[in-house]
Amino acid sequence: MNEKEQKQHFQNIIEQHKGILHKVARAYCPNEDDRQDLIQEMMIQVWLSIHRYNNQFKISTWFYRISLNVAISFYRKNTTRANKYTELTEQLIETPVEDKSENERQLYLLDQFISELKEIDKALMILYLEDKSHTEIAEILGISVSNVGTKIGRIKDKLKTRFSQLKS
Amino acid sequence: MDELEIKKLWQTTNDKLEKSFVIDKKNTEEIARVKIYSILGSMKPIKVFALFVGILWVGIGGIALSSIYLNSFNDANKFFLFSASIQVGLTAISLYIYLYQLITIYQIDITEPIIRTQEKLSNLKISTLWVTRLLFLQLPVWTTFWWNETMLTDWGILQWIMTLFFTLSFIVIAIWLFFNIKYENRNKKWFQLIFSGKEWTPLMKSMELLEQVEEYKDHNAST
């Protein structure tokens, strides 16, 4: 593949999988400005890794690995800002929840639940919500399929508890 | 709300947001001009400067000390010579670890599975602890640099008590820290006190991540 073809290939991959960039960035980065930096960093890493693509895996598996690895590493560097932002958003959101529609409340609750998860659980949660098969999740995370099942089971339990609290 | 409804909520919300999320073509063209970073290019200028000063210090120190050992060992102040040798030696080891980390971090493959990549990255970051341990181990020699043979004849008991007290205290502290600054003690108060501050955040965060990695791996091993 010559340089021009490689650039075109890169643009096509980004266009086809921009949703992954967006979802991962949204889950790991509540701050809009930081989120743009994170998306930029993910795209740079996709470009720099394009020659490493191994076609034994689906392109989405490869893309998820890069996006999640970058997001977790980015979070490690930006914890201070992320913490400040989380505190602020928690303060801001506390009051108006009751005024929101049922759908908005549930969405808020889901976002809040994801933001409280630890980094690797958060990756698992995104893949679960994206309806990925246990096999693909195992390939992305690098754990066994049975381990994926157990971990998802635990997260689902927590999620169920959280939503049942909302009902009550 | 059941599992399917939650997934549907996530997917419809993201579908809506994604429609308004446009990737600027100019931006991807710009990114496609990015060449593989050089190690030096990816480092902050202050770190490049620190590395340069460290290499200079070890280089000049090593040459000067070798020259003393070879040409004027008998005339040299042995306290200074041995203190300086220990200091330069430990700095050289720290520098080696630092360079090793830089090169290894640079070579990590970000397309590998999350658990493997994050474990490697966290372990590398945590190996920074070795540099800190070695730097603390240098502490006692800073109290013996200026010793000389006239002290043995000219000094009174009080001066000796004071000097030995400082040096012995530094030796005890340095050795204790050398053996106790380790990942297993990350939750101790004294550890968190030493490693508090913004510049240590990525290190502490790496430790938290390694705990998460271990949780996944432990289960993996038992299944």
Image (tube, rainbow, N blue to C red):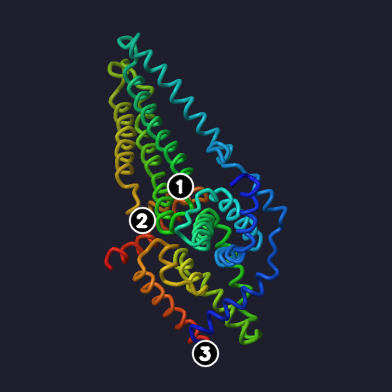
* Chain of residue at mark 2: B
Label 2 is placed on what type of residue?
Lys
Task: Give the mark nearest the N terminus, 1 or 2.
Answer: 1
Q: Of the residues tagged 1 and 2, which is closer to the observer?
A: 1
* Chain of residue at mark 3: A
Residue annotated with mark 2: B188
Q: Position of residue A24 (x, y in %)?
A: 56, 65
Q: Are marks 1 and 3 on the same chain?
A: no
Q: Residues within 10 Å of mark 1 (few under 14, many from 20)?
A: few
Q: Position of residue B101 (x, y in %)?
A: 43, 41
Viewer-proximal residue, B40 or B165? B40
What kind of element bears circle 3? helix
Residue depicted at 46% across the width and 60% down the height: A57
Q: Are marks 2 and 3 on the same chain?
A: no
- Residue B151 - label: none
Q: Of the residues tagged 2 and 3, which is closer to the observer?
A: 3
Viewer-proximal residue, B55 or B215? B215
Residue annotated with mark 1: B108
Label 1 is placed on what type of residue?
Ile
Q: Position of residue B139 (x, y in %)?
A: 37, 34
Q: Position of residue B77 (x, y in %)?
A: 34, 15
Q: Residues within 10 Å of mark 2 (few under 14, many from 20)?
A: few
Q: Is residue A17 left or right of residue B169?
A: right
Residue annotated with mark 3: A167
**On screen, A7 above or below A59?**
above
